[in-house]
Amino acid sequence: MAGDFDAGGGDDGYVATDDGGGSDDGGADRDGGGDGGGSVAACQPLAPPAGPVVEVNPSQAGELRDIVAAAQSGTTIVLADGSYALDQGDATSRLSFSVPDVTLRSASGDPEAVILDGGWVTGELVSISASRVTIAELTLRRAYYHPIHITGGAADIEGVRIYRVRVSDPAEQGIKINPSGSGTYADRGLIECCRIEMSDAGRARVRNNCYTGGIDAHQAWGWTVRNNRIVGFWCEQGLSEHGVHFWTGSRDTLVEGNVIVDCARGIGFGLGENGNGNQRSYPDDPYTGVGYIGHFDGVIRNNFIAVTSVALLSSEYGFDSGITLDQARGSRVLHNSIVSSQAPFSSLEWRFDNTLVEIRNNLVSHNLRDRGGTAELGGNIEGAALDWFVDPGSGDLHLSGQQPAVDGGVRLEPGWCDLDIDGQTRDSRPDVGADELF
């Protein structure tokens, strides 16, 4: 049933209505459970479709590519329950969305009842190059490259929404965002209430020296990644990219309320000193004369990041970092909880000369690591014990009771992190980490 899709593994959510530094409203108690990393209030099934509807059943799987290509703006393609084989004998059987305002969703609203399966043959299951395309409430699994690939179109696009989708076992990244070959961009999209996961079977199919990760975005502006659950991105040999990664000059990304479990790297803004020479230029040039910037501004707040997998920790690279900031400028990292059962290279790190960030009220089991650049620190706690948290093994990093994290934070400017991961208001003496204990 639609209400049974528990992508988040319980009450791990955060409710917010803004996409930046403004004030938040809304709320949900932690007893609700939920989809993605989010609460029930944030992750409800979609409303019934409006406008033209095209109904498709599994016997039409071979026609689905043509059905998508023929869809006019405003159309909703509704998939009946069942499995749709997209491994049509080559790597080009993808569903290409090149017309704006088209939606692909399940009829039942149950993401696990509709499965689009690439069989590790089809390169991309869904390719999006148009504005305001919505993919919702279905499962995409076993792509040879990326289950979902979003790029610029004939012009820049915006408003793509990926909602209550389960992405499983990609051979590369789960959701990929990058410019088109002609240099147009995909901006101001939303990835919300999804479950993005790698199983042992999928890990065996990962390509190119562990070239995988949950969400990977290049030169993307104004995206929100909220209330998702991301699990299992690591390899026995090689180092996976992050559960959530925005780099090569991405800007104004909001990453909040996510639960990231057993990934070699959790959240990254930027990567490396020069991003392989790739950086997006913006008309207003917000940091004139600074040099290469891997990520401009943006907020990482109220996320749970947990690693306890013995297999991951004994792999070649183990747990590298919970949050990584490489040549990130103007970014804020606020009220995150990062816990591992063995020491990572760093729980949270900032690196390279052009990094200038704010890191406040984060609760970590191990170390904050200064690798260059400048960080304004305040209210962070290192060395948190596992028993401070409800269930690190499942990614539930709610506080288990009174300990130094309670009332241990510093007050932040209003609007930057007024609510905790459950949408509850922080008091005048905020608790450190993503959870405000009540």
Image: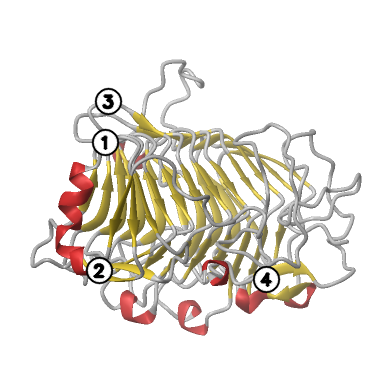
Q: Is residue 278 above or below residue 346?
A: above
- In the image, which is nearer the foreground, mark 3 or mark 2? 2
Would residue 32 appear left or right of 85 to someone viewing this image?
right
Q: Earlier in the sequence, mark 4 or mark 2?
A: 2
Do the residues under discs 4 and 3 have CB atoms within 8 angstroms? no
Tell me the crowding category of disc 4: few under 14, some 14 to 19, or many 20 or more residues within 10 angstroms, Cα based: many
Percent position (x, y) of residue 345?
A: 54, 64
Q: Nearer the viewer, residue 293 or 134?
A: 134
Tell me the crowding category of disc 1: few under 14, some 14 to 19, or many 20 or more residues within 10 angstroms, Cα based: many
**Secondary element at image label 2:** helix
Q: Earlier in the sequence, mark 3 or mark 2?
A: 2
| Type of amino acid at the residue the image marks with label 4 | Asp
**Secondary element at image label 4:** strand
Which of the 4 image quadrants contains residue 323? bottom right
**Secondary element at image label 3:** loop
Q: Which mark is residue 99?
A: 1
Which of the 4 image quadrants contains residue 340? bottom right
| Type of amino acid at the residue the image marks with label 3 | Ala
Query: Mark 3 — residue?
Result: 155
Q: Earlier in the sequence, mark 1 or mark 4?
A: 1
- In the image, which is nearer the foreground, mark 4 or mark 3? 3
